[in-house]
Image (cartoon, helix red, strand yellow):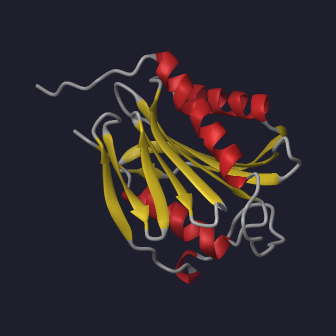
Amino acid sequence: MNLRMVIPVEIAVIAVLGAIYYGYHAVQDPQEPARATSSQTPSAEPSALPTVDTTRLVSKQGGFAVGVPDNVKSKKVGPAVTMTSGDKVMTVVVAPIESGTIAASKKAFMSGMKETYTDVRETGSDTPTVDGRKAEATYGLAVNPKKTQIRFVNVVVKDTPRNFAITVFTSADADPLFVLPRVNAVVDTFEVLE
């Protein structure tokens, strides 16, 4: 018999708001300026991206495992895992969230973003398969209270009895050749524990 801890909706909302909070604090004052890019959304040919080694981290409380890219600090916070690059240009939060449709999870995330940031705009979406499960990635831009423009990616992974979110925040001018391989490594190594 496979017993899974069901996270109440209140904890899921806290996880989403926690992701937004960590993103705000991680990219509000980067220690080193990142290289500028002129594109509205991160883009690079997959074959041109460098590979990134990861170390597997298991969150038994969260019900998942994920690869933490080299040179990225990680920490378990309750059922969530947070990751921050050394220069604080990128923050990732992986957490279980409420059950339900991907659309409802996306709406809750965007609502939370609009409560914390200004000029929040979705710039794209994608429907990848993550760990063999249906998922939706939402890409966008926002401005934090210190008037710094940031990028975000929120990947909702559909599962039962709960969904999962992989949320990334980065400065808007961060180098895609730094950010994308690490984001891809996190998403590609994510797995739900059975």
Residue 188 locus on image (x, y percent)? 42, 60
Would residue 30 be found to the left or right of residue 98 on screen?
right
Query: Number of labelled discs?
Result: 0
Name the residue rendered at 45%, 54% in the picture.
Answer: 74
Name the residue rendered at 34%, 21% in the picture.
Answer: 6
Q: Is residue 61 above or below residue 30?
A: above
Name the residue rendered at 77%, 76% in the picture.
Answer: 35
Residue 168 locus on image (x, y percent)? 60, 51
Quarter placement of the N terminus: top left
Residue 116 locus on image (x, y percent)? 76, 33
Given the current orientation, which residue lies at the most extreme front position? Answer: 31
**110 vs 94, nearest the viewer:** 94
**106 vs 87, nearest the viewer:** 87
**145 vs 12, nearest the viewer:** 145
User: Can the viewer see residue 44 in this picture?
Assistant: no
Name the residue rendered at 65%, 38% in the picture.
Answer: 20
User: Can the viewer see residue 83 in this picture?
Assistant: yes
Quarter placement of the C terminus: top left
User: What is the quadrant of residue 121 in the picture?
Assistant: top right
Residue 126 locus on image (x, y percent)? 60, 51
Given the current orientation, which residue lies at the most extreme left position? Answer: 1
User: What is the quadrant of residue 177 in the picture?
Assistant: bottom right
